[in-house]
Amino acid sequence: MFRASGFKPSNSSPKVKNLDLLVRTAIAHKELSPGVAAQVNQYRNGKLSCKERRMIAVLDDAIASGHITAVEMPISAAVLRKAVCRVG
């Protein structure tokens, strides 16, 4: 699938491969789902390698240029309270 898009497979560590897959998924679908955004934010909050910083920069550039649209799921206050009560 990615070869048709011009992407090359990665030969990096599993952590880098996971971020690579998240970025490729967002680019391929032209949207950033809330789940993918949450996972990418976990990477942002950690110590990043040079390659990981580049991948996040590519994702940020694609979002800024409008190639990728961030998908937001509206959550009502009642649904949020239920979710918090279940976890807590």
Image (spheres, rainbow, N blue to C red):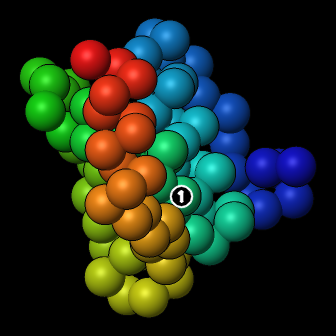
Please say if 2 is above or below 11: below
Q: Residue at x 32, y 28 (%)?
A: 85
Between 85 and 18, the residue placed more toward the observer is 85
Q: Is residue 47 left or right of residue 83?
A: left
Which quarter of the picture shows residue 86?
A: top left
The image position of residue 25, as x and y in percent, is 64, 51
Q: Is residue 17 left or right of residue 80?
A: right
Residue lying furthest bottom: 66
Q: Residue at x 35, y 49 (%)?
A: 80
Q: Is residue 11 left or right of residue 50?
A: right
Few, some or many residues within 10 Å of mark 1 (<14, 14–19, 20+) = some
Report if residue 18 is visible in the image.
yes
The image position of residue 82, as x and y in percent, is 40, 39
Q: Amino acid at mark 1?
A: Ser
Q: Residue at x 26, y 17 (%)?
A: 88
Q: On the image, numbered disc 1 is attached to which residue?
A: 33
The number of callouts visible is: 1
The image position of residue 41, as x and y in percent, is 26, 42
Between 74 and 84, the residue placed more toward the observer is 84
Look at the numbered disc 1 and give the secondary structure of its residue: loop
Q: Residue at x 88, y 49 (%)?
A: 1
Between 49 and 40, the residue placed more toward the observer is 40
The image position of residue 4, as x and y in percent, is 87, 59
